[in-house]
Amino acid sequence: MIQMAAILTIVSWAAVSADAHAAAETPNIVLVMCDDLGWGDVGFNGGKIIQTPHLDEMAAGSLKFTRFYAASAVCSPTRASCLTGRHPYRLGIPGANSGHLKPQEGTLAELLKRGGYTTGHFGKWHLGTLTTTAKDSNRGGPRGAAHFAPPWEHGFDVCFSTEAKVPTYDPMLKPEGGGSSRGWEYLQDAAKAEPYGTHYWNERGEVVTENLRGDDSRVIMDRVVPFIEQAAKAGKPFFAVVWFHAPHLPVVAGPTHAAMYSRYDSYHRNYYGCVTAMDQQVGRLRATLRTAGVADNTLLTFCSDNGPEGNRTAPGSAGPLRGRKRDLLEGGIRVPGLVEWPARIPEGRSTDVPAVTSDYLPTVLEIVGARLPDQRPVDGVSLLSLFDGKMTERPAPIGFEYAGKTALVGNRWKIIQLRNSRKARTDPGDSGASRSTEGSYMLIDLVDDPGEQNDLSARYPEVVQRMAGTLEAWRASCRQSSRGADYSSQQQKN
């Protein structure tokens, strides 16, 4: 049996010298993420309904992860992990619309900016509010002033950002009367619409009012493209975070993409259509990199922030996996994952090594030769040796905690503990696989049983005991971080 490495990865990097920076690679970095896209929603994972030709083409030229994980079962915590390399419970962002990105947390944008990168955030932020004065989105305005934490205060030079969700077509509008929470048919007459209640904000803290009609993914990419083109023309390395809203509810597809799925009901048609519209913008992004002459030396990633919304009758698909959004079963946290970097990663590779969104920061920092300024715990690991074909197993397991549920994922084994219910919740419509009573652990062999149908805890109690000890030690470390132990006394005053 594989011995589990210590879960806690302490990164003790100090500031590096200018010579080290000069010797390091300086690829452009583009992190693309969807919102609530299921593992089985894409063609490269076997999806048969939704057309994703551009993502499938990217997968053919990428390192494809069969086991890529979002750090949480919902969006805000996962987003925090992408920028900090840390589990969101350390940061005080346990769920959606809770907490905010604290100023003491160094972000990947801040670290790269110090190394000469120009930085941009485009799309959904969801790590704090973007205004303290105007009513906006879920928490924006005076009611959420304590959570004001816009991207421009966390290292981003250019921003085109919303606090949270928007409709996936005509993002600033909704039908008279509000429409369904699931979505609606595209608005043919804007005069009969009303404001959705959120805004796009720029890096100066101003509301953006131009070019906001039509497909939201296209609206976002209209800002990403000139950012890339200007940086490439200036010969400046760039870091772009592109966080699409699609396919988070409310889903709306424009006429062209809705027509592609006309045989389905409105909910499914709009979901499928907005995913294909997003896929088209991924193709546009990759074409822009090629035209600008920077594709070879650009590290481009793609993933989702968690599994699909709803139950099995909803349009999003977790493929063969059990569970969905808000669940620590595989369907809630295992998501599509790609990394493309032509100059470094051979095309057409696939890996079963587990990876997670927390790995972005340590991976990028090793590539560029940058280092964290202190010894705070980092939960991610660098994947650079995996890119080079030298990593065959993950050196440390991945810890999860959400809504009272915890889990630990290793190279083969996974344990799941449910603390807030007497029995493990199963996804409506599943086969009623083995369930775990409160306080006990379910043990899954993810290599032989990725659908999590068989609880092997009684057969391998020593594996459960070992992994449970690792999980509890990790949780204790997260609790210590959440109390501010990772910040200096001066930082805590700021």
Image (cartoon, helix red, strand yellow):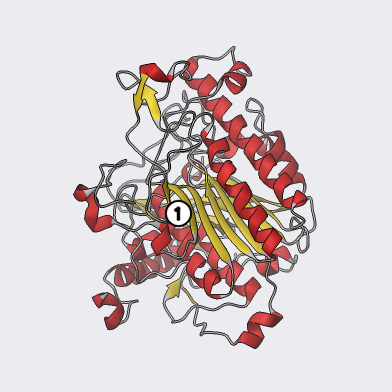
Foreground pick, 203 / 477 = 203
- Check disc 1: other Cα within 10 Å, few if <14, some if 14-19, many if 20+: many
The furthest residue to the left: 143
Tell me which residue sits at (76%, 50%) in the image.
Answer: 290
Q: Position of residue 125 (x, y in %)?
A: 42, 50
Q: Is residue 1 above or below residue 328?
A: below
Tell me which residue sits at (59%, 13%) in the image.
Answer: 262
Identify the residue under disc 1: 79
Type of amino acid at the residue the image marks with label 1: Arg
Tell me which residue sits at (66%, 62%) in the image.
Answer: 28
Classify residue 383 by image quadrant.
bottom right
Foreground pick, 206 / 451 = 206
Q: Position of residue 449 (x, y in %)?
A: 58, 44
Foreground pick, 468 / 68 = 68
Q: Position of residue 437 (x, y in %)?
A: 32, 46
Foreground pick, 320 / 424 = 320
Q: Is residue 129 above or below residue 257?
A: below
Q: Position of residue 220 (x, y in %)?
A: 54, 42
The furthest residue to the front: 210
